Image: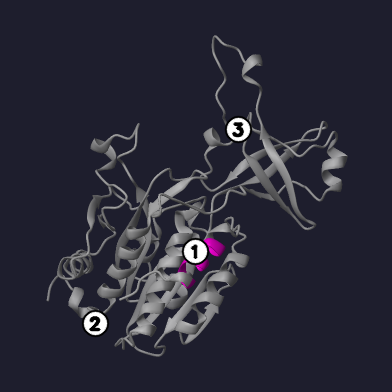
Amino acid sequence: MSILNEKSELFIEKYLNNPSPTGYESEGQKIWMDYIRPYVDDIFTDIYGTAVAVVNPGKSLKVVIEGHSDEISWYVNYITDDGLIYVIRNGGSDHQIAPSKRVHIHTANGIVEGVFGWPAIHTRNRDKEEAAKIDNLFIDIGCETKAEVEAKGVHVGCVITYPDTFTVLNENKYVCRAIDNRMGGVMIAEVARLLKENQVELPYSLYIVNAVQEEVGLRGAEMITNTIKPDIAIVTDVCHDTTTPMINKKIEGDVKIGRGPVITYAPAVQNQLRDLIVKAAQDKEIPFQRLASSRVTGTDTDAFAYSNGGVVSALISLPLRYMHTTVEMVHKHDVENVVKLIFESLQRIESKEQFSYFK
């Protein structure tokens, strides 16, 4: 069974390269909807831009598979008289990676290019160097006055993204900004493709959800779960590869790219659904890893699980290196195996009652 094909690879590159900052996801959603449309029966969107593709509509049982579509970014917050721009976060943007990065400022007139400036090494205090932090990061777009900046269409509230684009390292490592979590959107779209190509008949309605605004508090999932009112939800997001330097496995767990999807244990994860996913992986010989999350998963799983009086929910994560940087890295085989694991798990769902703790 083919997982990623040539068309999939082209979609990955186009979708990841497109900027979709939190609150401004619509252009990326258009790309996603265009790709998934041949494989589903219906598509709808909500008022804030979450996109939902539906397979087999009208059934009493509703199952969701979900990823989120937004990427971390910055907002223009203050423009100095000298034409420099100070920023605040839109999501969990990492201040430490910003110095010397190129940026795109999104305006009504189009993209304005700029750079995060930083003092030369020769000029910094050698006794106690000042680290990058939110109140000393600034963007230079080559203007000399505030009026010149504003004449380019830049104003407080403009959103700022990095232009870094998709690449492949060593044949099977995908690298890009915003793999968290547009690769989730890719994977759930590929599940739809496999269901269609393999003519799988599901006994329920499947809602394939590409949610907005996860990076600012799971907001898109919070909204759409109240719209759909699903019975069951399988969420996919990313988690940390903990094998790179400066990460404590005793705290973060032992996870590595290339070793397979990560199945999470957490209060929000419904045990019976998680066990169904584990059994699917074992039966189909899909490699997988386990991860424990204290209190919350920090993903849209939490938003689904605790909505509408409780939704049977589970989380399948894609291991990722260098989260919230512009060089996020995942293994192609993990991407394929997450797709396969969701595909196989969906075919084992028959009713909500099978997940009761008291049957």
Part of the protein shown in magenta: 7-15
| Alpha carbons under labels 3 and 1: distance apart | 28 Å
In the image, residue 106 sits, relative to residue 84, either above or below, namely below
| Alpha carbons under labels 2 and 1: distance apart | 33 Å
User: Where residue 12 is drawn, which disc sits there?
Assistant: 1
Q: Nearer the viewer, mark 3 or mark 2?
A: 3
User: What residue sits right under mark 2 in the picture?
Assistant: 351
Q: Position of residue 146 (x, y in %)?
A: 84, 38
| Alpha carbons under labels 3 and 2: distance apart | 52 Å
Q: Residue furthest left?
A: 359
Q: Secondary structure at mark 2?
A: loop
**Mark nearer the N terminus (2 vs 1):** 1
Q: Position of residue 149 (x, y in %)?
A: 82, 42
Q: Residue furthest front?
A: 171
Q: Nearer the viewer, residue 230 or 245?
A: 245
Q: Quadrant of the C terminus?
A: bottom left
